[in-house]
Amino acid sequence: MVNHRGSSHNHMRTASTAKFISRKQSPRAIAVYIFLLFAFSIFIFVFNAGNIVEDHPAPVISIQSHPQTKFLQTADDELWDAPSRHGLRPCIKPTSRYKAAHGSDRYLTVKSNGGLNQMRTGISDMVAVAYIMNATLVIPQLDRRSFWQDSSIFSDIFDELHFITTLQGNVRIVRELPKELELVPRARKHFTSWSSMGYYKEMMQLWNDHQVIHVAKSDSRLANNDLPLDIQRLRCRALYHALHFSPPIESLGKLVDRLRMRSGKYIALHLSYEKDMLAFTGCTSGLTDAESEELRIMRENTKHWKVKDINSTEQRIGGFCPLTPKEVGIFLQAIGYPPSTLIYVASGEIYGGDARLSELMSFFPNLVFKEKLATKEELNAFAKHASQSAALDYIVSLESDVFVPSYSGNMARAVEGHRRFLGHRKTITPDRKGLVRLFDELESGQLRETSSFSDLVQQMHKNRQGAPRKRKGPSPGIKGKARFRTEESFYENPYPECICSSKVV
């Protein structure tokens, strides 16, 4: 059965269409139709072009010139933003059980040893030791015989008056021994490293025969763990509140402002690639035979370095070597920092000079040293004073947006711990052992220097950026005194004793 209604309707529509086509159109109407057709074609082309998937990655667009680009802004946040502190804050006030030390006629004299940060942490330990032993602390003598040959005295590097007055409610501190005690016999003591509070209570027996105890070395004389909370907080008050740098050094903290005027954000790179560091660790990867021999001779001739025969290959594979300048460049590039990143290099004289530094500059040409930021006149006061010069590097590193140490030496540990204390500022600690494996695979061609390598590096360092965590204990299986060497330093991570939640007093 035929649907006549539908046939009639189709016949009428066909007739109407024919009538429309046969009608003569005006030139103006034709122009409008052509314009609309052209506009519609352009719209279709633009819409489809936006969905084309390219075979090659699109060029990176500068965030500063295109702040509205959400994807790039997110990536920038990941590179520069500090990890969440989870409501943690510094907490170094004494507990209700704390008893301030009284003035004592027993005196502790101290000879600090090592470089700047070894002395800083050692002095803080001696403040706590003086408290435990109920002694008056005499302003420590600084190390003048170490590799750095620095003739600075305490007041050249530290604000002596501030140190004394800040701690006056905790420990009595004097500038020098009373004259009547200068010639009396002293108990000369090498306190045992990483000692407990009980050890120093036993040492108080020395007061029975002596009024003055002289401490020959100050570094690592207190345990990292298992000390009373008030002793740990006293160490933090000494290091972070009392032991400020001297006014001339603090005044050059304006180097930070000069850096920020160049580029709003910057990385402070502690590049541990000095001659003494390489000789001490026995790391010679990438060096010439002549350079390796020079380092071996230096190690052999340095009496207080106990280990002389070192296998460089084993050191490197074990992650015990500083990253080379080239390795640092590859690492930071893999993390995602662009070549334009401003990097302040905190270091002494780089072994191999400009030739070796150029290996880093090929990745990041925007390197800055304190010699470029400060005038000659400003730096003259610090000439031939390595510890004072290191203090400038410390300040700039502490205030940086990101701190990256190429090796876990005294400076790196001290800066990292201080940044944790101040609010867990971003600190990227390279996994040197893991990176060496990746570098070797990259060198051999097993890995290509592409996104896959970057992904591996970024994943490896996802949890190594300064986020809050409790201090690491000793390595498993190690017993006796040796276990203390494998613990994380108290000053590298003073959590939880000196960092707590806002609810804790």
Image (cartoon, grey):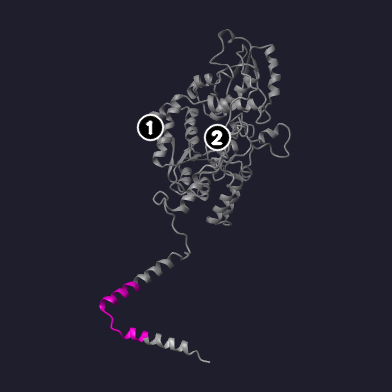
Q: Which residue is mark 1?
A: 375
Secondary structure mostly seen in magenta is helix
* Nearer to the camera, 98 or 16: 16
The image position of residue 501, as x and y in percent, is 60, 35
Give SS at disc 1: loop
Q: Secondary structure at mark 2?
A: helix
Q: Name the one closer to the observer, 442 or 479.
A: 479
Residue 328: horizontal and vertical position, in percent?
52, 45
Q: Residue at x 43, y 30 (%)?
A: 252
Residue span colored magenta: 16-37
Q: Amino acid at mark 1?
A: Thr
Amino acid type for the residue under numbered disc 2:
Asp
Spot the residue most to the left: 27
Q: Is residue 239 left or right of residue 24?
A: right
Residue 276: numbered disc: 2
* Residue 232 vertical position relative to residue 138 in the rendered view, above or below: below
Compared with 297, 11 (above or below) is: below
The C terminus lies in which quarter of the figure?
A: top right
Q: Quick one: 12 or 278, which is closer to the camera?
A: 12
